[in-house]
Image (cartoon, helix red, strand yellow):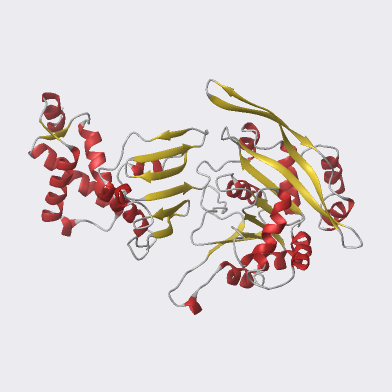
Amino acid sequence: MDNASLFFSSGGHKKEFADVLHEVQEYISGKYAALISGNLHEQRQQITAYITKYLTDYSLGVEGLGFDALVDRLYSEMAEFSFLTEYLFANNVEEININAWNDIKVYYADGRILPVREKFNSPSHAVDVVRRILHKSGMILDSSQPVIRGHLSNKIRITVFGNPVTDHDKGVAASIRMINPQKLGREDFIRNETATPEMLDFLSLALRYGVSMCVTGATGSGKTTLMAWVLSTIPDDKRIVTIENGCREFDLVKTDENGNVLNNVVHLTTRESDDPKQNIDQEKLLEFTLTANPDVICVGESKSAEAMAAQEAARTGHAVITTTHANSCTATYYRLVTLCRQKYAMDERTLYNLVTEAFPIVLFSKRLEDNARKIMEITECCIAEDGSRSIRPLFRYQVTSNDFIDGKVSIRGHFEKVNDISPGLQKRMLENGMPANLLHSILKGGTAA
């Protein structure tokens, strides 16, 4: 048994965690700060060793925490993100919502929304930890910049509201979103009843054979996760270019056991600058991407003038997939019209004709009241010879009942195929290389398998 185990088995001097943290921080900063290695692994080993030494030398403990747990928590508080670290890098966590320093809720992948066991020590402690997170993306939270959006990694986005836009005694409010933490695949969507095999295979094949589409829905509805899966089904010899705003959420590169790259992917992100002339936004990246021989272009999110460039790319023959926020498939086109008008003051009818031509397929994703995610509808915009447009529903999720069972919402329904794709879209997919027998199988209700 080591000294720490002997000490804690006999009781030791128990103090409040905040007091122990303060002592350990002073000890390390005063004696060993200059020795800390730049290597993260070595740094953790050194800091942990110093924490262990101080606790054993001064027989310090915290009620309810074993020795190893106390060391881990002290390290996390000093070098990481306090108790948030556990949730930030968990595979089953989708979102962390900080409403105040003492009110933190965690959204899990299985639909649970639970308050965390821990809380910050004070409003100022909450601000300090969130500032530490923002520092990773070079962002500063202060009174001159009280609203900040940044990223912790390629998979974690954070939006923060600080004083004075929030109450001073609340500390800070933040939303931290993890993008596809479990990297869901086709079988996961089927098992979770997000969509049917037929719906998923149709989306995959449509993009594969040159049909552009827009994935729409509210925040947290699963748009990015769905789009990432559709992109992952593109054949390895096709060149995919992804264009994202601020941080990279997609990771589509495939490698073999020896680290050799198997597919053909370029990931691009925007760059902000204090000099507007040096800004590289999604629109500019899309402009240059068109000269880089892409087979499929992904615009991570259309929420501004890049919507105009995205529809232009789609109408020039490139397969484009993007997301936007809208309440239905039909509303998506009007949303895109609004975004395009931020770039050009064209009349709405002209823009409507452009975006409906650019994105024949729209799928609407939604998180229901019971936290289940569904593809509620997939539609095709059909264009007649006279130029008139009609929205043709292809698949939909039909809700049949909403009930409360044991105090929880239970939503029941079923997916249904409403129509086949139009003859015009069938012709387009055949011209883009889809085998006739595969198209025939889809029309009969089969799957790509």
Could you say where residue 328 lies in the image, as x and y percent from the top left? 69, 48
Using the image as rendered, state which of residue 228 and residue 117 is in the foreground.
117
Image side of residue 145 versus residue 12, left or right: right
Q: Quadrant of the N terminus?
A: top left
Residue 420: image quadrant is top right
Most distant residue in the top direction: 406
Could you say where residue 166 lies in the image, as x and y percent from the top left? 37, 53
Residue 275: image quadrant is bottom left
Could you say where residue 140 lies in the image, as x and y percent from the top left? 34, 62
Q: Quadrant of the C terminus?
A: top right
Using the image as rendered, state which of residue 364 and residue 280 is in the foreground.
364
Most distant residue in the left direction: 58
Q: Please determine whether, in this image, residue 142 is positioned above or below residue 24.
A: below
Could you say where residue 413 lies in the image, as x and y percent from the top left? 70, 30
Using the image as rendered, state which of residue 80 and residue 306 is in the foreground.
306
Residue at coordinates 49% horizontally, 77% vertically from top-left?
Answer: 276
Image side of residue 142 versus residue 57, left or right: right
Using the image as rendered, state which of residue 371 and residue 229 is in the foreground.
371
Q: Is residue 57 visible?
A: yes
Q: Is residue 295 visible?
A: no
Residue at coordinates 27% horizontally, 58% vertically from top-left?
Answer: 38
Numbered disc total: 0
